[in-house]
Every structure is written in structure tokens, then in C-alpha cells.
Image (cartoon, rainbow, N blue to C red):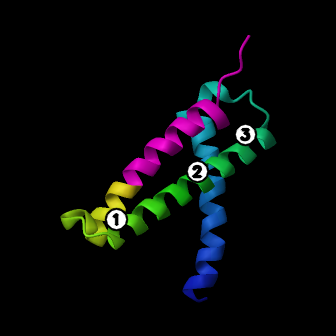
Amino acid sequence: MGPVVARCISAPVAIVATFILNRMWAFGAARETPLVEAFLAYCAIQGIGFFINFILYTGFVSLPLGVVSQPVVALALASCIALAFNFLGLRFFAFKPRKG
């Protein structure tokens, strides 16, 4: 199996696994959100987070920003910003506690 095929298999497995872990552990109070609704919201947030990460990373490595232009530093910085977005999006959108 080549790396592209492996990535095509591993990405959906990782999304499903992290959805289950987040739903059970990190955002357990929101388990009453219907499963399909939560999963679709989760996928949307993760997709937007990936886009944010990619755009920031591309910008950081493309501009003469000193140390921030270094790929590893750019990746770390972009990932931290995307992580914050993902957490907030999951907390207040995908796994929001039901009112009532």
C-alpha cells in the first residue's frame, strides 16, 4: 500500500476515532446531541480547522517572517491557532450542551 492510499484510509479512521473519543471523554456532557448531527458538525469544524491551519502555514512559510518562516515553526504556530479554533468550535457548535 502506498502513502496516498494509506492516507486515504487513515484520515477517515482518525476522524471517526477522534470524534468518538471527544464525544465520550472531552465533551461527555454533550452526549445527548444526536449522533449524526454531532458527527456532521464535528467534520465541518475539523475541515474548517484544517483550512485555517493550511492557509496560516502557507502564509507563514511564504512570507519573509524570520524564524516564523521556518517550516517546523510555521507548522507549530498554525497548528496551535487551528487547535484553538477547533476546540472552541467543537465546544460551542458540535458538542454544545443542550439547553433545558
Residue 99 on the magenta span:
yes
Kindly state the secondary structure of the residue where label 1 is placed.
Answer: helix
Residue 25 in view in this figure: no
Q: Amino acid at mark 1?
A: Phe
Kindly state the secondary structure of the residue where label 3 is placed.
Answer: helix
In this rendered view, identify the residue nearer to me: 77 or 62.
62
Query: Is residue 81 left or right of 45 when viewed as pictured?
Result: left
Residue 22 on the magenta span:
no
Q: Amino acid at mark 2?
A: Thr
**Is residue 44 positioned above or below 68 on the image?**
above
Q: Quick one: which residue is furthest to the left in this view? A: 66
Q: How far apart are the two marked residues, 3 and 1, measured between alpha carbons?
A: 32 Å
The mark closer to the camera, 3 or 2, is: 3
Dot placed on the residue nearer the N-terminal end, 3 or 2:
2
**Is residue 92 positioned above or below 58 on the image?**
above
User: Residue 8: x percent and y percent?
Assistant: 65, 75
User: Residue 57: x percent and y percent?
Assistant: 40, 64
User: Residue 25: x percent and y percent?
Assistant: 55, 35
Q: How far apart are the two marked residues, 3 and 2, measured between alpha carbons?
A: 12 Å
Q: Quadrant of the N terminus?
A: bottom right
Query: Is residue 93 left or right of 50 when viewed as pictured?
Result: right
Q: Which residues are magenta?
A: 79-100
Label 2: which residue? 18
Q: How far apart are the two marked residues, 2 and 1, measured between alpha carbons?
A: 28 Å
* Dominant secondary-structure state across the stretch colored magenta: helix
Q: Residues within 10 Å of mark 3 (few under 14, many from 20)?
A: many
Residue 37 in view in this figure: yes
In this rendered view, identify the residue nearer to me: 98 or 84.
84
Q: Residue at x 52, y 45 (%)?
A: 86
User: Residue 43: x percent and y percent?
Assistant: 67, 51
In this rendered view, identify the residue nearer to me: 92 or 19.
92
